[in-house]
Amino acid sequence: MNPFKVLKALKFLVVGPLILVMLLVINAMTSPGYWWVGWPALGIGIAWVISLLRVIRAAVVVGGIAALVAILRHRT
């Protein structure tokens, strides 16, 4: 588990929706009758879910290590 990948995934959890909002505004201003933003939204949504799972996995691993350290400290 690369910590830089986790940090990039955490950043994308914030930046991804902002990009999508910007695309929605561009779509509304340029072609209000045609909803082309659905395809980029699908791609960004898939990437966002993958990033979320990466961050959750890292949190579970760090939490497990912290729990193991707490158990080992309690035994001594």
Image (cartoon, grey):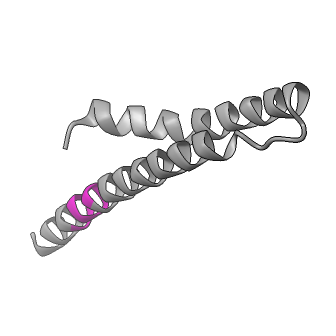
* 34 vs 15, nearest the viewer: 34
Write down the region rendered in magenta.
61-67
Asked whether residue 2 is drawn in magenta, I would say: no
Q: Residue 33: give x, y in percent of width and height.
A: 89, 41
Q: Is residue 10 above or below residue 59?
A: above
Q: Which residue shows up at 45% across the image and 53% down it?
A: 52
* 8 vs 43, nearest the viewer: 43
**Corner quadrant of residue 61:** bottom left
Q: Please give the count of numbered marks on the rendered protein.
A: 0
Q: Looking at the rendering, in which quadrant would you find the C terminus?
A: bottom left
Q: Is residue 70 left or right of residue 76?
A: right
Q: Is residue 71 above or below residue 18?
A: below
**What secondary structure prevails in the magenta region?**
helix
* 8 vs 44, nearest the viewer: 44
Q: Residue 28: give x, y in percent of width and height.
A: 88, 34
Q: Looking at the rendering, in which quadrant would you find the N terminus?
A: top left
Q: Which residue shows up at 31% across the image and 58% down it?
A: 57
Q: Residue 58: give x, y in percent of width and height.
A: 31, 52
Q: Is residue 19 above or below residue 51?
A: above
**Corner quadrant of residue 74:** bottom left
Q: Which residue shows up at 41% across the image and 39% down it?
A: 9
Q: Which residue shows up at 28% across the image and 55% down it?
A: 62
